[in-house]
Amino acid sequence: MSRVKLNGIEIDYAVSGRGRPVILSHGYGATRRMWDGQHVALGDRYRLITWDMRGHGQTETPDDPAQYSTGLTVADTRALLQALGVSRAVVGGLSLGGYVSLAFYLAHPEMVEALIICDSGPGYRNADARTAWNTRAHQRAADLEARGLDAFGGRSREVREAMGHHRSAQGLAHAARGMLAQQDSRVIDGLAAIRVPTLVVVGDRDGPFLAPCQYMAKKIPGARLEVIAGAGHAANLDQPEAFDRVLLKFLDSLPS
């Protein structure tokens, strides 16, 4: 575990290995610990960076709800890479972390060697669909404020396993309204402009995200789609051996 002060907040992160840098971001309600297995699987072959986003895990949770947004999370990703001396990396994540990774590419394409998007979606072009998504995000925030972390009962595996590692339910509520909720169609509209090797991974039991992952794989030029049998929303936790095999095959295929 390491800490660094960036963009006015203290960020909790972990680094292992050496060589080509890879940064993986977690899903909403999870923490960097969901990637512990990948630190082991990648060993010394790659320099793996994982971190807790604003409002999550042991990263600082500002009281001001205005301090939570996709743009600020993208800025935190960039600042962390720069603090670690990384000018270009393989950038990826699961669910919210995958969405943030796409947004990071669109903001800083010069810093991205490749993308790894897991059990995620590109947002919505349709305003009504976006409104429905945001309504659910705001309800999740309200539940957290009313019931605390108990509101996460019955959620997906990576969220359940993070239960004892968050600083505050209020930080997660702010993150739901500011980071999980979406403001525009910028990410989905930018998929066709991606020009780096891209791996899209989804569990075959992750019903809500199968179609979005298939869509992204079709829209991103040259993207590779891998469907992990027997996996739900956290493919790396549900079927770690299959996930790691797919991940390493992709990383090893990248130009040196």
Image (cartoon, rainbow, N blue to C red):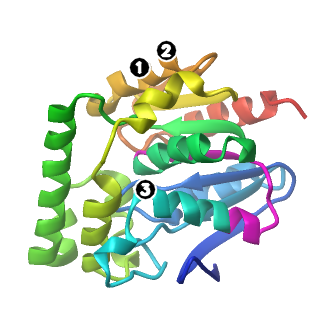
Residue 212 inside the magenta-drawn segment: no
For badge 1, the amino acid type reads Tyr
Residue contact at pointers 2 and 1, CB within 8 angstroms: yes
- The picture quadrant where one finds residue 166 is bottom left
At label 1, counting other C-alpha atoms closer than 10 Å, the crowd grade (few under 14, some 14-19, many 20 or more) is some
The x and y percentages for residue 4 are: 65, 81
Above or below 229: residue 86? below
For badge 3, the amino acid type reads Thr
The x and y percentages for residue 180 are: 31, 54
For badge 2, the amino acid type reads Lys
Number of numbered discs: 3
Q: Gap between marks 3 and 1, in whole Å?
A: 22 Å
Please indicate whether residue 125 sits to the left or right of residue 191 in the image: left
Q: Gap between marks 2 and 1, in whole Å?
A: 5 Å
Above or below 219: residue 228? below
The x and y percentages for residue 16 are: 75, 64
Q: What are the residue bounds of the magenta stretch?
A: 80-95
Label 1 element class: helix
State the residue position of label 2.
218
Q: Earlier in the sequence, mark 3 or mark 2?
A: 3
Label drawn at residue 93: none
Label 2 element class: helix
Q: Is residue 226 visible?
A: no
Seen at 69% across and 49% down, the residue is 41
State the residue position of label 1.
215
Q: Nearer the viewer, residue 27 or 174?
A: 174
State the residue position of label 3.
70
Seen at 67% across and 26% down, the residue is 195
Q: Gap between marks 3 and 2, in whole Å?
A: 24 Å
